[in-house]
Each structure stands twice: as structure tokens, then as C-alpha cells.
Image (spheres, helix red, strand yellow):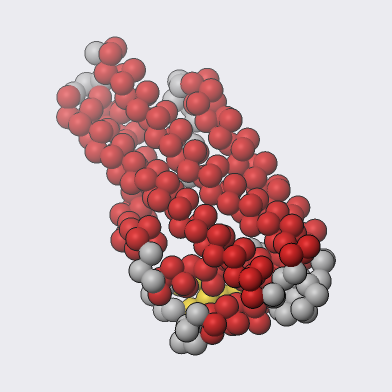
Amino acid sequence: MFFPFGFGGYGLYLLISLPALLLGLWAQFKVKAAFGKYSRVRTTTGLTGAEVARRMLDMNGLRNVEVQQVSGFLSDHYDPSRKVLRLSPQVYQTPSLAAAGVASHEAGHALQDQQGYAFLRLRSTMVPAVQIGSWLGPIIFFVGLFMAGASQTGETIAWVGLALFAATALFAVVTLPVEFDATRRAKEWLSTSGIVYQQEMQGVNSVLDAAALTYVAGAIQAITTLLYYAFLLLGRSRDD
Ligand SMILES: [Zn+2]
């Protein structure tokens, strides 16, 4: 994310974005704490994350989706283009409640892909625009803002930058139903399949709910940054 400190609107930026930043940090902390805690709690069934994901995929007719190990911490993800589910070592190899939760959440994304879940499709089509807009948007915006005092063209350029960056914020919002839905599928399948016993679900829930909160914080951060840009530009327009 782009943090435009030193633009005179420093106080305004903090006022708008600080609560979202703090929420984001708190959510990150909660995920790490919950994941750490429940990585040490073994499931009764004793299945590793890789085995949990494999079972969930197979039981839903997704034998073609491969489960692989990928390096990194909490780097778990589903790749819709390659139909591959990649799990971090701590999830892939460990028979813990945290691993079962994360693995089934990722398998939930594979199920969304299989069923053509609308928000996942929308999210995937937005990726190219977001990859460009997230870094080029703020650059174009601030170039335009610098020029805005001297010319009308500058202001137009700034609005173009703002629109590009808005795609990033929209992407973060569209991510929310995708993540909530994958978590819902994971919880439902884990409890109904008997992979995780009912009394163990609390551990799974606290890991997945904390992860969901990071996405909420991310969306709020993107929206508040967008609002800050808009305030800067509108404030600038009034001065002319
Ligand atoms: Zn996810």
C-alpha cells in the first residue's frame, strides 16, 4: 500500500487512516497468535493439512486439483489458473487444528472455482487492472496533484490516478465475500465430515475468524486511502 506522508495532509491522513491501520496490525497479531496457539493443538483424527485438503477436494469431485507444499509462513493459497492448492510447510505437514482450518479454507477456494462462484470470477477478472492500478494509480495521482495548481490538465490527470487506485479498493471489497465464503465452506465441511470434532471447532474458528478480520482491515485501509486522495484533490480544487 502507498503511504503518502509529507503531503501537508499528514494530520488528515492519520485521522482518516490510523484507525484502519491499527485494526490491520491488531488483526495480523491475532492471526499469528491464533495460528501459533492452534498449530500446537493436534486434531483427534491426526490428519495433516495436506491430508485434510486432499480429502475435502476428493469428496467434492476435485481429484484433478493437486495439493503442493510451498515455502513461507502463512503463504497458503489456491491458484485458479493452474488448479493447484499450495500449502505452507506448517500447514502441509502438521496434524493441527490450525492446519486443518487453513487447508480446508484453501480447498474452499477450489470449490468456489469449480462452481463458478460469482465473486471469485469477478475478483479474478480484476487482477490485471489491480496489478497496474495499485502502483501506477498513486503515481499518476500525485503527478496530477502537483500539476493541478498550474493547469486544469493536472486535475484531470489526478482524477485518472484516483480512478485507477479505486480499482484496488474495489478489489479489496470484492475479496471479502470470497474469503467469508471459503471460511464458511471450511467450517461446514470440517464439522460435518467428522475431520474435526465439534469440541475442537473453536480452535479452527479462532484461526479462520482472525484471518477474515485481516481482509476486513485491508478493505477499510484501501477505502480510507482512497478517501484521503479524494480529500486532497477536492481540497486542492477549492484553493484554485
Ligand atoms: Zn482465502
> Which residue is depicted at the point 52% across and 30% down?
17
Left or right side of 203 for 92: left
Left or right side of 191 for 56: left
Looking at the picture, how far across and down is residue 193, in whole percent?
A: 64, 75
Q: Is residue 137 visible?
A: no
Asked where in the image residue 235 lies, by quadrant, the reply is top left
Left or right side of 132 for 208: right
Q: Is residue 203 visible?
A: yes
Q: Is residue 101 above or below residue 47?
A: above
Q: Is residue 125 above or below residue 218?
A: below
Looking at the picture, how far across and down is residue 178, in whole percent?
A: 46, 57
> Which residue is depicted at the point 22% across and 21% down?
150
Q: The C terminus appears in which quarter of the rendering? A: top left
Looking at the picture, how far across and down is residue 218, in whole percent?
A: 52, 45
> Which residue is depicted at the point 63% across and 35% down?
22
Asked where in the image residue 49 lies, by quadrant, the reply is bottom right
